[in-house]
Amino acid sequence: MEFAGSDILSVDQFGRPDVERVFEIATKLQMEETRGRIGEILRGKILGNLFFEPSTRTRMSFASAFMRLGGQVISSEGHEATSMAKGETLKDTIRAVQEYCDVITIRHPQVDAAAEAAGIARIPVINGGDGSGEHPTQALLDLFTVQKEQGKVDDLHFAFVGDLQFGRAVHSLCKTITLFNRMKIACIARDVFQMPDTIVEQSRSRGAHVSLTDNFEEGIKEVDVIYMTRLQQERFPDRADLRAMEQFVLTRNLIERTCKPAVTIMHPLPRLDEIASDVDDLEKNAAYLRQPHNGLFVRMALFLLTLDKTKELP
Ligand code: NCD
């Protein structure tokens, strides 16, 4: 794809070379950062960071990435703080916000809200999570983390665990890994929380081997990467029965008893109880502790690409 001037709404926009291009720039940025040479490539640029849903990492990571490149950030947090609380439409909000900035990052509870914003804005719009739809920047930072942890992105065996039905991070990541070769994917979830059929079918049509199971211990035995997720309770506020359903919990004991020694444990975060705190001590495996750091460089890379500034890298 041509990144310059483009929106980033769904991982369906990417081919393998696009993902590799983002990783190449993120790696370069990470190297330059350690030498203190990143510079102020985005000086004079403004990011409009619009978050209509709770967030710590994604919101602050977008802002930090932009500021570390010398840009400035204006932001809006929550519905209540905007004119949308007075009844304004997303369309009218975006029409105005695009006058104040050079690129928009948006998180919204509604699937396709980022696409709607992109349809209005003449500046690039980056999806920071649209309801239970997609979370493309998370998928890129997740796979970038896998590459660093496992040393490759082909020939890997993944387990996605937890709420695969409503979790946008797993939707985007599953679609992204199937751009690579010889992938095996175990979707481990209670029936109501299983991966949407469309994503399973797309993965299979791209040649990935996909299995669906609710046997957690069996499912994680042979895998290289375990991607844990929390129950997306905010997506089904009226379903006490679903909220009460027992969830899979990854403990240090289970990992030591069951998994490959080099298994990479990931989570988009925030975690509730899915990963016991004693797993944090398995430093080599606990890659969820490194995902936020990697995310910063992936998001920097995406800003440079969409704003057509990669040529100014040292
Ligand atoms: C995820 C999200 O918001 O989709 N978090 C994140 O962006 N790092 C996952 C979640 O909230 O469970």
Image (spheres, rainbow, N blue to C red):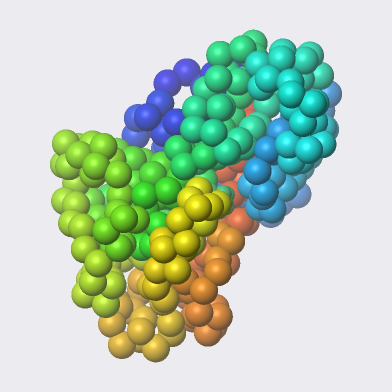
Q: Is residue 158 visible?
A: no
The residue under the point 78% across, 38% down is 80
The residue under the point 41% across, 77% down is 250
In which quadrant is the N terminus drawn?
Answer: top left
Q: Position of residue 200 (x, y in %)?
A: 23, 44
Q: Position of residue 2 (x, y in %)?
A: 47, 18
* The one of 29 and 67 positioned closer to us in this rendering: 67
Q: Viewed as shown, does residue 312 lie left or right of 298?
A: right
* The one of 189 and 202 positioned closer to us in this rendering: 189
In which quadrant is the C terminus drawn?
Answer: top right
* The one of 311 and 178 positioned closer to us in this rendering: 178
Q: Quadrant of residue 20?
A: top left
Q: Is residue 204 above or below residue 309?
A: below
Q: Viewed as shown, does residue 54 lie left or right of 112?
A: right
Q: How many marks?
A: 0
Q: Viewed as shown, does residue 138 lie left or right of 101?
A: left
Q: Viewed as shown, does residue 106 lie left or right of 78?
A: left
The residue under the point 44% across, 50% down is 167
* The one of 174 and 260 positioned closer to us in this rendering: 174
Q: Position of residue 270 (x, y in %)?
A: 58, 61
Q: Position of residue 170 (x, y in %)?
A: 40, 50
Q: Is residue 201 visible?
A: yes
Q: Is residue 185 above or below residue 81?
A: below
Q: Quadrant of residue 194?
A: bottom left
